[in-house]
Amino acid sequence: MSKKTVTITNNWTGKQVDLPLVEGSQGPYGIDVRPLYSELGLLAYDPGFFSTASCSSQITYIDGEEGVLQYRGYPVEQLAEQSNFLETAYLLMYGELPTLTQLSAFRTQICHHTMINESLKNFFHGFHYDAHPMAVMVGVVGSLSAFYHDSLDIRDPEHREVSAHRMIAKMPTIAAASYKHTIGEPFVYPRNDLDYCGNFLNMMFSTPCEPYPMDPLKEKALNLLFILHMDHEQNASSATVRLAGSSQANPFACIAAGIASLWGPAHGGANEAVLEMLEQIGTPERVPEFIRRAKDKEDPFRLMGFGHRVYKNYDPRARLIRKTCHEVLAQVAPDAYNPIFELALKLEELARSDDYFIERNLYPNVDFYSGIIYRALGIPNNMFTVMFAIARTVGWVSHWMEMMGDPGQRIGRPRQVYTGATERVYCPIERR
């Protein structure tokens, strides 16, 4: 069978080249455009990488038209409802669901690395008391290579694995410490007798004065949110981690770069913006007014939490979070937060029945309901993106390990179409 190709012709010169098609296990073919420049002298132009595959990967598959999200072939719905954080983390990192023995060993490895060096506590105190927790996260995570430089040989698979374990283990500890610093409370050490999500909640909300009463429903809700946020293919932050890693930077620097990218309001900060929008709307009676404003191109108001770069259908993560909202709010915060949830439901109902949103495939995305749950769990707004970072660390280290284990990996070097001035002659300053 002949190899599938696409023929590209340069009409200016008459030259043409056959570009091989790259077939994945699911989804559209890719076109190997590497000969495009060498054979035709042309560059592929794709601002925002809407139609560009920057790599091949076996980790996550998305079908945006059908609303499908799979981790290593497993539908995210199954994992979110039946698995737990560490089991799913193992799956993303190693490609298969663990046996009981493998999961026990993995949990032991993660627990072994949950503490951070005591000297890092002084680093936290160097930040202003009202520093944004994401600013603290970027700085502290980037500094880890100065404390854990015993396993930074990126050519050694064991070193890569240890660094990945450290990142997954220490991220909740660093996140909780960032929060404690902003409210002036003492840091709480991790407890390895608790599950991953329970340990984080304890570090966030317990104090030396009194323990934190662990609520299984809160743990369950956080476990679901963390699984749903673990990975999402080549999003901005994961692509940033891969690009930074392609230069052979140490893994902690790569993850810090991913955190910085995630911090952007167009990426990880959207769920915070959703809550601000709902508070601006105020009551269900005002929803039609804001629906009209969202459709008015002259109005600066934007409907947050609807639509997605990839999904042209209902985001499968949003459906699961919506269901969990009902469970959490009914038990944890029946009075304080139900009005916000009812407002969100009303907004979704009207938007999904409006031709404007239907024609544009604007369905609720993962951010629309996640902030409501976080608030019900007691997580402050400025920690929402930090929660995203804790979960997405698993995806980041999985992509980093996959990329570093690829023998064909090369440093990323995007090209550009230059639109600046052509060659000019320097003019001395006294003549300008």
Image (cartoon, rainbow, N blue to C red):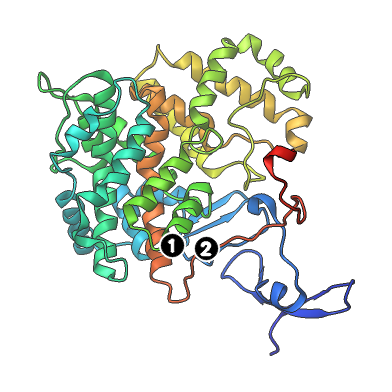
Q: Position of residue 101 (x, y in %)?
A: 19, 63
Comparing 96 with 298, the one in front is 298
Counting residues from the N terminus, which is met first, the one under dot 1 or under dot 2? 1
Please count the marks in the image. 2
Question: Which SS class for mark 2?
Answer: loop
Q: Position of residue 348 (x, y in %)?
A: 62, 26
Residue 111 circle label: none
Side (left or right) of 274 relative to 225: right
Q: Residue at x 53, y 48 (%)?
A: 236
Give the residue furthest to the left: 209
Question: Which SS class for mark 1?
Answer: loop
Position above or below: 270 against 51: above
**Residue annotated with mark 2:** 412
Q: Residue at x 48, y 51 (%)?
A: 240
Q: Are marks 1 and 2 in contact (CB under 8 Å)?
A: yes
Q: Which kind of residue does numbered mark 1 sit on?
A: Ser
**Residue annotated with mark 1:** 247
- Residue 80 appears in the figure: no
- The image quadrant that residue 280 belongs to is top right
Give the residue furthest to the front: 430
